Image (spheres, rainbow, N blue to C red):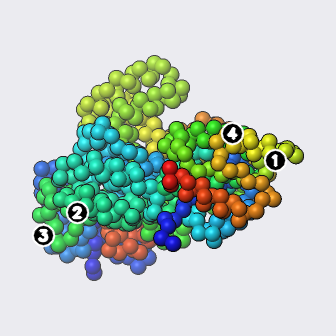
Amino acid sequence: MKKYLGIDIGSTWTKGAVFVPDAEKGLLLEKLYRTPTTVDDLKRGFDTCRDRLDPKRECELYYSSSAKGGLRIAALGVVPELTLRMAREAACSAGGKITSVTAYKLCADDVAAMLKKSPDIVLLTGGTDGGNEECVRHNLELLAKLPPELPVIYAGNRGLRDLVREKLAGRELKVVENVLPELSRPNAAPAREAIRELFLERIVSGRGLDKIVAETGCEPVPTPLAMLEFLKSFYEFTGRRTGFAVVDMGGATTDFYSACQDKFEPNVMVRGIPEPPVKRTVEGDVGMRVSARAAFDEIRDEVERRRGEEFVSRMEKYIDHVGSECDYLPQTPEERDFDLTLAAGCCTVALRRHAGRRRQVFTTNGPVAVQTGRNLRHVNVVVGSGGFLSRMTPEELKDMWWESPADPECEMLVPQHFVWHPDAEGLMVLASDVARGVPEKACRFLSDKLDLILESANHENQ
Amino acid sequence: MGEREMTIVLGVIGADCHAVGNKILDRFFGDQGFKVVNLGVMVSQDEYIDAAIETGAEAIVVQSLYGHGEIDCQGFRERCTERGLAGIVMHVGGRLVVGKADPEEVRKKFLAMGFDRVVFPDDDLREEVEALRADILRRRAD
């Protein structure tokens, strides 16, 4: 019987799992193993994991890598809410990490700030097809002076493609379809594909991944891309019936994925670019260790309201400590409490940034709600993933979201009735690897895991 | 004709949800050869401006049917200038004020606010099309 091996090369652990097909549940987990990632040569850790799980090389292999936390992308666009938003969406959905965003025309200072964040790619967008040309024309002059080894993806106004090719000749350049050919027609897929190709060329060529490709004949995908694609197939598999979200919180970033469809509601006016059914956002300043300081600065006032001034001043010291010593684990109940508070803050910030808003407007036809962004109210299941959340009990997870302060002017569209589900064995990402080969089986596997949860969610709602 | 296509941004401003006139104008301007970027109803000043910048539109056509046009349109021209759209052609039309105000007074008020043309419900739309075209061509020539 054919078996499937999924391996994920994370920044800390290289994890793998062997799945066997099952008529009823799609897949069954047979073996699970993890070993520290060997940063200098990723192949060593990968081989250790593979030898342990599949010594005879019988399994069909699929693997992903979040090496370097994914490609670092500098996004450029014209209007922040339009092309720049699409550039961000393309970058996030490709599994990239956004290092800077710049709207309108660049100046030399912007370019310097952008380069300081050492991006791997510049994603240049701007103008709908037949639309704004001025900004891209201006920006090209500055981009032409960038170091030649920095690749550029152009996904802007179609009318400027020839000029882009001319001005950026001599550097690695990918010219793809516009991310926003018309205001009502978002088109992130071609830019996403270009980013994925660059991921393979750039990331794979370093630190041993190329050796893995040569030996296995199989290419890796960025971990978040594998996850997003899996969640897309799963959402289709469920007939788009169940809204769900995944929070993947690490030391440096917090990823938020959601799959949900807005239901038609009378007297609600939806503004802005249409939302995709499945979406990923990444918060680069929200995490448990490297980003602990930035995250804490954002939540400090709320922590003070909840726990008091004295708690905050003690927590402040802890944050400084863990920010500089990233592999620190809490030693006392109080330190555990600090970590839990920080985790809840990170989840809350990531959720609030991911969720849309509704505000009441009084019109001559009565009150109307104007909605911008994503409506997560019909999300029923939230999976907690990543080192910290996956080890929590469902009971502890319940405190991971703070209620938003009630604001009659502006309602946050966060989940209403939902259950938390810890991704206890870190299987989400391994199943998403295998899903590239056997999507339906992997969906049934996840469905089987979540079904129990869904039942209890329905039960709680009743 | 070899002439460059004219892109216009269309929408109903403020908290106004009158959708029918908006659909009619979308269709009408489209049939007359304009590329219409229609934002629909309940559009804020910044949404018109964002759309105009991104699509490279040469005119903003503001509709208002519920009588609060004056308050919704205040400062619109200045905002366009501030955001880099100085001199963009701006037309406004509909039932712009409450009650039976003298149309000439209303026209003066909106012209003073910086609109290039004010259109009333009984006006001939063919004239509006000609005027819009002429204003855009004049702007191109500047």
Mark 4 neighbour density, 10 Å: few (under 14) some (14–19) many (20 or more): few
Q: Quadrant of the C terminus of chain A?
A: bottom right
The local secondary structure at tag 2 comes to helix
Asked if the residues shown at circle 3 and circle 4 are in contact, with their CB atoms under 8 angstroms apart, the answer is: no
Residue name at image x 52 percent, y 69 percent: A238
- Mark 3 or 2: in front is 2
Give amino acid for label 1. Pro
Q: Name the residue rendered at 12%, 69% in the picture.
A: A215
Examine the image and state in which quarter residue A207 appears.
bottom left
Question: Compared with residue A250, is residue B18 higher up or lower down, i.e. above or below?
Answer: below
Question: From this viewpoint, is residue A69 visible?
Answer: no
Q: Quadrant of residue A3?
A: bottom left
Q: Nearer the viewer, mark 1 or mark 2?
A: 1
Residue at mark 1 to residue at mark 3: CA–CA distance: 80 Å
Q: Residues within 10 Å of mark 3 (few under 14, many from 20)?
A: few
Q: Amino acid at mark 2?
A: Leu
Q: Which of the two discs, 3 and 4, sits closer to the camera?
A: 4
Q: Residue B29: in sight, yes or no?
A: yes
- Label 1 near label 4: C-beta < 8 Å? no
**Quadrant holding the N terminus of chain A:** bottom left
> Disc 2 versus disc 4: distance between alpha carbons?
59 Å
Image side of residue A280 versus residue B98, left or right = left
Q: Helix or strand or loop: what does disc 1 sit on?
A: helix
A426 is higher (above) or lower (below) than B15: below
Q: Which residue, given by chain and number where applicable, does mark 2 sit on?
A: A200
Parent chain of label 2:
A
What residue did someone put label 3 on? A215
Spatial CA distance of label 3 from label 2 is 16 Å
